[in-house]
Structures are given as C-alpha cells and as structure tokens.
Image: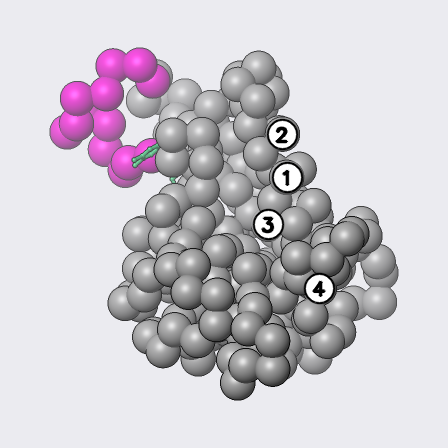
Amino acid sequence: MNVIGINGSPRKKWNTATLVAKALEGAAAQGATTEQFHLYDLDFKGCTSCFACKIRGGESYGKCALNDDLAPVLERIAAADALVIGSPIYFGAVTGETRSFLERLLFPYLTYTVPYGTLFPKKIKTGFIYTMNVTEELSKESGYEQFFKTNERYVQLLLGAAETLCAYDTCQVDDYSKVVIESFDPLHKAKRRSEVLPLECQRAFELGQRLAGAESVAA
Ligand SMILES: Cc1cc2nc3c(=O)[nH]c(=O)nc-3n(C[C@H](O)[C@H](O)[C@H](O)COP(=O)(O)O)c2cc1C
C-alpha cells in the first residue's frame, strides 16, 4: 500500500501542508508507505491540449506526453494505491499549481466516449483537503461546496472513490500585527490555529487511515 500526498500550497509548513502530512501519518499508521510532493518545488505546466494522450494507437495514448518535473510524480501516482490532494482556496478555487496538476493528472485518462470513461487501469482512493479563510457558512453561501463536489465527481469517474475534508476559517499569518489585514480578528485567528487546527489534524489523520485501510470511501 503506497499513499502519495500532494501539497498544492506554496507554503510547506502551514495549514494545507500540515494537514496533508497528517493524512500521510494516518496512512502510515495503517502500514502504508507514503511520499509527499510539494507542487511549488516542481517546474511544470498545466495541460497544453496537445492531444498526444488521445491519438489512436499513439505511443502516449492514455498518458501525458509532457516531460517535465510533474511527469515522474504522475508515474508515482499511477503506481500508488491512494492519493491525498491538498490545496488552499485561492479566489474560490484551488491554487493555480493544483489546477495545473489536476489537468495533467486527469485529462489523459478521460475518454471522449459516450458516456465518458477512464483509461486508468485500476481504482485508487483519493482524499481532497482544502483549507480556506472563510467560515463553513460563508463557504456554502459562496458556492464552494459545488466546486468541491465537481472535483470529487471527476476523480470518481477517472480514478475511483473520493472524499473531501475542509478546514475553514484558517489562520493565515503568524503575526497579524505586521500585515495590513483588517477584515479578520487576530485573536480569533490565533485561537483557530491553537484550538481548531489540532482537531483538523486529527480528522486528516483519520482520513489517511481510511484511505490506506479497508473501509470504503464514497464512490
Ligand atoms: C492569493 C490568495 C487568495 C485567497 N483566496 C481565498 C478565497 O477566495 N477564499 C478563502 O476562503 N480564502 C482565500 N485565501 C486564504 C487561504 O485559502 C487560506 O489562508 C489557506 O488556509 C492558506 O493555506 P496555506 O496556509 O496552506 O498556505 C486566499 C489566500 C491567498 C494567498
């Protein structure tokens, strides 16, 4: 059992990376081997729509033909049993790097058949982890849940079962007095970091355990 973690935040020690690492700890506690990749360490592009992955009889059929830093990561995922994809929410969506990663991961497996199908040769479980400034209520009002469901649906079609863990109302910087941020209460945010983040770490740990275990994740 091998579980791959993807950190789609530019920060390697903040909310998203912490939760992805916790999910991998949970998987390791179930006996899985784990690997974590930081997307911002890699030099890569999103899908360039070259269609090499869709050419009939082509040598890259079902596989991304771009040969950059993401290529070996996509190979590791193809050989893995489960995947954790973490991203902060930037302007209501995942970060640009996470988006580019998802395009490259998913498009080569998508068949333009009726109905759509997948060339991924097996089923793996995926856990999405999103961290964001907004509260759970505001996330719902702003339509974020729809975005999360859409990502789950693509992964369910193409890779296998998927579930989502959200960390809301995150603390964004360690010292709010040094930055011009008037819209958030520093004391409230510090409390979120000291009191709520540990609970979210526990939920991420349990997510990792589920991904690496026999228990099923929503298909
Ligand atoms: C460029 C940028 C855009 C952001 N946009 C949103 C947003 O649309 N909604 C939101 O809830 N939080 C937004 N945030 C806040 C981050 O999602 C949040 O602080 C997150 O937990 C950061 O993750 P990290 O600590 O792993 O870097 C934004 C932050 C940045 C830097």
> Under 8 Å from ligand 1: the CB of mark 3?
no
Q: Estimate the spatial distance between the alpha carbons at disc 1 and disc 2, rounded to whole Å.
A: 6 Å
* Amino acid found under the numbered disc labelled 3: Phe
Question: Residue 150 shows which numbered tag?
Answer: 1
Instruction: Categorize mark 1 by other alpha carbons within 10 Å: few (<14), some (14-19), many (20+).
Output: few
Instruction: Categorize mark 4 by other alpha carbons within 10 Å: few (<14), some (14-19), many (20+).
Output: some
Query: Is 176 one of the magenta-colored residues?
Result: yes
Pinpoint residue 126: horizontal percent, then vertical percent. 66, 58
- The answer to whether the residue labelled 4 contacts the one labelled 1, judged by CB atoms less than 8 Å apart, is no
Label 1 sits on a secondary structure element that is helix
* Residue sitting at x 38%, y 35%: 90
Label 3 sits on a secondary structure element that is strand
Pinpoint residue 52: horizontal percent, then vertical percent. 48, 72
Q: Which residues are magenta?
A: 172-184
Above or below 206: residue 150: above
Query: Is 203 one of the magenta-colored residues?
Result: no
* Residue at which label 2 appears: 146
Question: Residue 112 shows which numbered tag?
Answer: none
Label 4 sits on a secondary structure element that is strand
* Residue at which label 3 appears: 128
The answer to whether residue 27 is left or right of residue 8 is right
* Residue at which label 4 appears: 118
Please state which of the two labelled residues, at mark 2 or mark 3, is closer to the viewer.
2
Above or below 119: residue 113: above
Q: Estimate the spatial distance between the alpha carbons at disc 2 and disc 4, rounded to whole Å.
A: 23 Å
Please state which of the two labelled residues, at mark 3 or mark 4, is closer to the viewer.
4
* Amino acid found under the numbered disc labelled 2: Gln
